[in-house]
């Protein structure tokens, strides 16, 4: 990206919360925190100062199927960014005192999440839609497992799971490719080799509706069900269905429930795609006295979409949005880096930009209607959180 003045560097590790034993739930997230406490050569303060000194930022996140560590700096510091992430990811100190201090931080993070009602509703929905399966667990872990995790267990997880064949180094920005590759060889050349990709089993059963009584100002509603895995050939058709249903300002749910009736501030649909399963959902928050009406309107729109699919104009708008938003995102080095790292980690290869655009453009009306019926017309569950 020769016209930018930035570089974004990411290390993507193809292991997440679904790959944890149940008694170690949250260890991926715990480890993500601990890696920023430093290595034997560089402590947490040293990491922060090294990034602040050049005006950059460094962060990470843990998902159900991968963990990503990323850094953004002025492009002239690209080699330093690669070196810093290599030190963080490959050579953590994992000191006992750091484990104890970060354990308190993570427990505070979990408590903070428990103060956000819509977060709780989404968490309960994922537990229900993937009931009894690791995909249903929150990546942050549970209080009891986070409290019980030991230094040796965390270090063992890093040793066994953070191996060379599960890692991708992704770089985007105004950089010299040969220099980046040489630096990667120096920094990551001693990464341990392991036994291949994690062994995963697909989820089977889906749970039931849930109602959680809470003294909130709004009733929070999540309705949804199972959808398509990440590599399914109908993924683009599902993208279009989702956008028409509740993915944008012109969507049916936003237009009908917020703009026309003024019943909510926020209503939106969304998708999650994993290696062997997926889910779709609609979220809305409304005054408790209007919650039943909002739920009825949402289910009516879902049923209507499943039965008849979107109109020709709606499909045209959705395609335009998906292509345009995708193109605009490519202007940012962080988005470019995430695109590369995400595809190589989760798909095992790259989809060319123009090819991805054509996949949306070439999706036909019959495929869209068929996917709407197959996904939205299937069994669905609802999670409601709020006052009685």
Image (cartoon, helix red, strand yellow):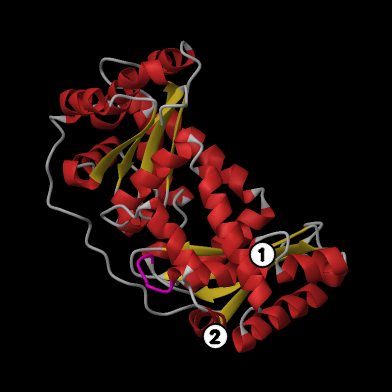
What is the tally of numbered marks visible in this picture? 2
Classify the position of the C terminus by image quarter. bottom right
Q: Where 313 sits versus 100, above or below?
A: below
The answer to which of 71 and 48 lies nearer the viewer is 71
Q: Indicate which disc, 2 or 1, sits on the residue closer to the N terminus.
A: 1
Q: Do the residues labelled 2 and 1 touch (CB within 8 Å)?
A: no
Location of mark 2 (residue): 373
Q: Where 371 sits versus 61, above or below?
A: below
Choose top left, top right, bottom left or bottom right for residue 355.
bottom left
Q: What residue is rendered at 45% in x and 72% in y?
A: 131
Residue 340 coordinates in the image, percent (x, y) = 35, 45
Q: Give the range drawn in magenta.
A: 230-234
Q: Determine whether, in the image, residue 1 is placed left or right of residue 379.
A: left
Residue 199 coordinates in the image, percent (x, y) = 22, 62
Q: Residues within 10 Å of mark 2 (few under 14, many from 20)?
A: many
Choose top left, top right, bottom left or bottom right for residue 176.
top left
Q: What residue is rendered at 46% in x and 36% in y?
A: 334
Q: Where 279 sits versus 37, above or below?
A: below
Secondary structure mostly taken by the magenta-highlighted segment of the chain: loop
Q: Determine whether, in the image, residue 189 is placed left or right of residue 171.
A: left
Q: Where 286 sits versus 74, above or below?
A: below
Label annotation for residue 388:
none
Residue 382 visible, this angle: yes
Farthest-out residue, bottom? 307
The answer to which of 151 and 330 lies nearer the viewer is 330
Q: How far apart are marks 2 and 1 (CA)?
A: 20 Å
Q: How crowded is mark 1: few (under 14 residues within 10 Å), some or many (20 or more)?
A: many
Residue 86 coordinates in the image, percent (x, y) = 27, 27
Residue 20 visible, this angle: no
* Mark 2 vs mark 1: in front: 2
Location of mark 1 (residue): 283
């Amino acid at each position: 990206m020769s016209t930018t003045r930035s570089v974004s560097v990411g290390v993507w590790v193809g292991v997440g919360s679904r790959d944890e034993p149940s008694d170690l739930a949250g260890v991926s997230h715990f480890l993500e925190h601990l890696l920023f406490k430093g290595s034997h050569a560089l402590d947490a303060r040293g990491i922060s100062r090294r990034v602040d000194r050049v005006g950059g930022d460094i962060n990470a996140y843990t998902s159900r199927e991968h963990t990503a560590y990323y850094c953004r700096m002025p492009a002239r510091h690209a080699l330093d960014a690669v070196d810093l992430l290599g030190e963080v990811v490959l050579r953590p100190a994992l000191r006992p005192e750091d484990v104890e201090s970060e354990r308190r931080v993570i427990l505070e993070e979990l408590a903070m999440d428990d103060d956000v009602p819509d977060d709780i509703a989404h968490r309960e929905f994922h537990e229900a839609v993937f009931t009894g399966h690791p995909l249903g667990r929150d990546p942050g872990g549970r209080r009891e497992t986070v409290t019980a995790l030991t230094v040796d267990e965390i270090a063992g997880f890093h040793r066994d799971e953070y191996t060379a064949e599960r890692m991708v180094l992704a770089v985007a920005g105004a950089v010299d490719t040969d220099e980046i590759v040489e630096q990667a060889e120096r920094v990551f050349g001693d990464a341990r080799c392991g036994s291949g990709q994690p062994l995963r089993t697909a989820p089977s059963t889906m749970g039931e509706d849930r109602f959680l009584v809470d003294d909130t100002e709004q009733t929070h509603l999540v309705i949804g069900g199972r959808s398509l895995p990440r590599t399914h050939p109908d993924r683009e058709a599902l993208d279009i269905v989702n956008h028409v249903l509740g993915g944008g300002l012109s969507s049916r749910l936003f237009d009908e429930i917020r703009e026309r009736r003024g019943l909510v501030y926020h209503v939106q649909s969304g998708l999650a795609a994993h290696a062997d399963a997926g889910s779709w959902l609609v979220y809305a928050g409304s005054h408790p006295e209007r919650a039943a009406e909002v739920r009825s309107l949402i289910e009516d729109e879902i049923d209507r979409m499943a039965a008849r699919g979107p109109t020709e104009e709606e499909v045209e708008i959705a395609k335009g949005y998906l292509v345009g938003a995708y193109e605009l995102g490519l202007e940012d080095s962080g988005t470019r880096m995430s695109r590369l790292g995400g595809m190589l980690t989760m798909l095992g290869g790259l989809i060319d930009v123009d090819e991805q655009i054509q996949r949306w453009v070439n999706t036909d009306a019959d495929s869209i209607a068929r996917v709407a019926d197959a996904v939205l017309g299937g069994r669905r569950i609802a999670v409601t959180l709020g006052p009685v």
